[in-house]
Amino acid sequence: KSSMAPPKFSQIQSYSPIMSKGSLTNMTANDVRRQVVEAFKDADLDGNGIIDREELQSLIKKLAIPLKDPIMDTDFIFDTLDTDQNNECSFKEFSDFLEPYIVKFEVKGFPMDVSEIIKEAFNALLANARAERDRVNESFLQTTHAFDNEHKGFGVNFWGSTWRFHMMDDFYTRPTAKGAILRCHLRFNNLRTRLAAVHAGTDTWVHDIMASDAKIRSEIANPEAVKDFCGRWLDALRRLPEKQPDGRPHEHVQEDMAA
């Protein structure tokens, strides 16, 4: 039995520049599956058998994957990997997530490089997450500009913008439920639900935020205008059906279009 230690992921991720094209071409899907085992072990920095959020951040950094929003991008990848929602990524969750990409690389005849497969998988997730965030941010800005252009914003109904950014955080960026931050995949629907409820007057967010924050209380001259803003933002969301990179609408976009 060989005493040679298995390759570390720091070595595995350097295949492309070190190994010849012929060497990569000769690798099989099963070779990569064996490398996934070692990649997971190397990413599991404390050796406890799972990957946590901090360890995932280290893996993303090692792979040199650019993050536009480090917190939300990392959360989106982690929440996708953590299918049983126990705030841990097991080896089974990690390998099950990568398996379709291993098959894709094999079928298309791409070089079987474990680091490229992981980067492909993570970047595909991030493309979809960013498309959703772009839709949210663009609709938010459209609504803000519309209020200002119609002379319903600053100096009329509002004397500041802090409340808007608190709303973005509470409804979408960092929403909470039962004391915990919502998983990324629930945040878009949470945003739509909260906007609709505030607009309808069944959500007490406006009253609660004004009661708890003196600065926001001084900013909002007309609470009814906040309800109007929520309704307008929701309408703007429905008018902006962002596409996935493969051209298909997101599931929640399909729901909007069917409504």
Image: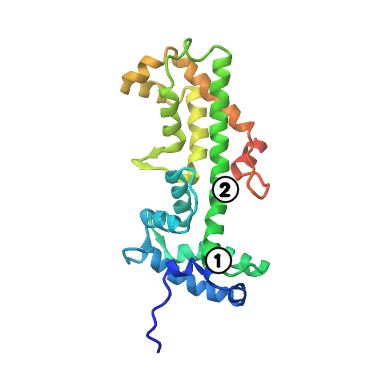
N-terminal of the two: label 2 or label 1? Answer: 1
- Helix, strand or loop status at disc 1: helix
Residue 258 % position (x, y): 67, 38
**Disc 1: CA contacts within 10 A as few (<14), some (14-19) or many (>=20):** some
The residue closer to the viewer here, 223 or 46, is: 46
Q: Is residue 78 above or below residue 235?
A: below
State whether residue 152 appears in this view.
yes
Q: Where in the figure is residue 22, as x and y percent of width and height?
A: 62, 76
Residue under the point 42% across and 18% down: 160
Quadrant in which the N terminus is drawn: bottom left
Q: Which residue is mark 1?
A: 99
**At label 1, which amino acid type do we have?**
Glu
Q: Residue flagged by tag 2: what amino acid is it?
A: Ala
**Quadrant that contains the C terminus:** top right
Image coordinates of residue 239 in percent, x first then y, are 64, 31
Q: Is residue 72 above or below residue 237?
A: below
Closer to the camera: disc 2 or disc 1? Answer: 2
Q: Quadrant of residue 135?
A: top right
Question: In this view of the protein, which residue sits in the foreground, 90 or 1?
Answer: 1
| Residue 232 shows in the view | no
Q: Secondary structure at mark 2?
A: helix
Count of numbered labels shown in the rendering: 2
Point out which mark residue 161 bears. none
Asked whether 13 or 256 is in front, the reply is 13
Question: What residue is shown at x 54% (from left), y 67% (from top)?
Answer: 17
Q: Which mark is residue 127?
A: 2
Rounded to the nearest angstrom, the CA distance separating label 2 from label 1 is 19 Å
The residue sitting at the bottom extreme is 1
Q: Position of residue 199 (x, y in %)?
A: 51, 23
Q: Residue at x 39, y 42 (%)?
A: 181
* Colour mode of the rendering: rainbow
Q: Is residue 171 above or below residue 4?
A: above
